[in-house]
């Protein structure tokens, strides 16, 4: 019998797209979550607390490939160290981790935990693969939708995104999961780069609204990092195919005035 692929965060934004791709490829999947539920369509659900380190070895037993997607605002590094240690103890042969672009360049606490998580994976003793995708379309949409509710929208022009569609990330990740361990692979960004004002204008046009935008400057070390583009994908990055404009048309409406990509 084929060993199951264990996926943490298998019911989340990316996991819910990845799991069906692994099933279509003929692999049984075991999803690690806080609460167990009945198995369905070749997917087994097991309960485990990654932060507390409880029940991880039992959850990983028999899984040769472990895919770590679960994350939160705090404790990602602790959870990843616990998972990586269990993967080594239980004899996993491939540990796959999803990080984020700019993890080494922007001095933010959350990104520091992602970088520490990358190191925990690389130091685990288990052959590994790490992918750094850019910000998901759904995340960027949530940001601009909230900002567009303000009567005057602050628009830091130095803040640039490379929004990538979750489906492109899931497809790339499935290739990596089913392939051989490859270490740190090229980043994955969307087809085009956009400043935040460009993303806001595209969203406002798609929703038929108008808002004045106030240019602002991001202060401090974080602002400097963004102005220097240290949050962007590394040279040699792969590019997704689904565009921000298409995502807006699918989830909001048809943009009347598509945003202009920064080249």
Image (cartoon, helix red, strand yellow):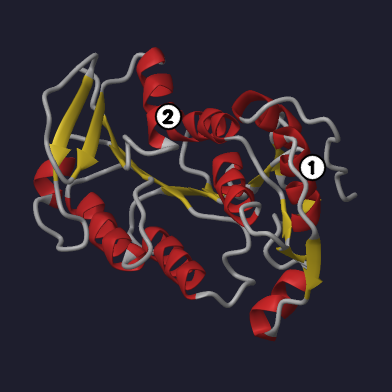
The answer for how far apart the CA atoms under marks 1 and 2 are is 23 Å
Image quarter of the N terminus: top left
Q: Can you give x and y, in whole percent of width and height, for residue 155 in the image?
A: 75, 64
On the image, which quarter does residue 205 sit in? top right
44 vs 73, nearest the viewer: 73
Instruction: Say left or right for 211 vs 19.
Output: right
Q: Is residue 176 above or below residue 198?
A: above
**Residue for badge 2:** 18
On the image, which quarter does residue 32 sit in? top left
Q: Can you give x and y, in whole percent of width and height, for residue 66 in the image?
A: 31, 41
Residue furthest toward the bottom?
220
Res 193 visible: no
Kindly identify which numbered label has been placed on residue 15. Answer: none
Instruction: Say left or right for 106 vs 158.
Output: left
Q: Can you give x and y, in whole percent of width and height, for residue 191 in the image?
A: 76, 38
Sequence-wise, the earlier of marks 1 and 2 is 2
Q: Is residue 101 above or below residue 224?
A: above
Label 1: how many residues lie within 10 Å, few (<14), some (14-19) or many (20+)?
some
Instruction: Say left or right for 23 vs 204.
Output: left
Residue furthest toward the front?
151
**Residue for badge 1:** 192
24 vs 139, nearest the viewer: 139
Label 2: how many residues lie within 10 Å, few (<14), some (14-19) or many (20+)?
many
Q: Can you give x and y, in whole percent of width and height, for residue 220 in the image?
A: 67, 86
Q: Secondary structure at mark 1?
A: loop
Q: Is residue 158 above or below residue 145?
A: below
């Amino acid at each position: 019998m084929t060993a199951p692929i264990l996926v943490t965060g298998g019911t989340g934004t990316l996991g819910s797209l990845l799991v069906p791709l692994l099933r279509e490829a003929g692999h049984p999947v075991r999803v690690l979550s806080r609460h167990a539920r009945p198995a369905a369509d070749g997917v087994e659900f097991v309960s485990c607390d990654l932060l507390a380190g409880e029940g991880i070895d039992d959850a990983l037993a028999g899984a040769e490939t472990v895919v770590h997607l679960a994350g939160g605002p705090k404790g990602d590094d602790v959870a990843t160290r616990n998972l990586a240690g269990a993967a080594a103890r239980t004899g996993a042969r491939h540990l796959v981790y999803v990080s984020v672009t700019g993890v080494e360049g922007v001095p933010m606490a959350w990104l520091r935990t992602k970088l520490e998580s990358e190191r925990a994976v690389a130091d685990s003793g288990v052959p590994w693969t790490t992918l750094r995708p850019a910000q998901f379309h759904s995340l960027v949409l949530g940001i601009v939708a909230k900002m567009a509710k303000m009567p005057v929208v602050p628009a830091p022009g130095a803040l640039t995104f490379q929004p990538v569609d979750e489906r492109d990330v899931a497809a790339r990740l499935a290739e990596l999961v089913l392939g051989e361990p490859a270490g740190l692979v090229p980043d994955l960004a969307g087809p085009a780069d956009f400043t935040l004002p460009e993303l806001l204008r595209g969203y406002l046009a798609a929703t038929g609204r108008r808002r004045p935008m106030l240019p602002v400057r991001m202060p401090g070390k974080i602002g400097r990092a963004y102005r220097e583009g240290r949050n962007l994908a590394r040279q040699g990055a792969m590019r997704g195919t689904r565009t921000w404009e298409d995502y807006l048309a699918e989830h909001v409406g048809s943009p009347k005035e598509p945003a202009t990509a920064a080249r």
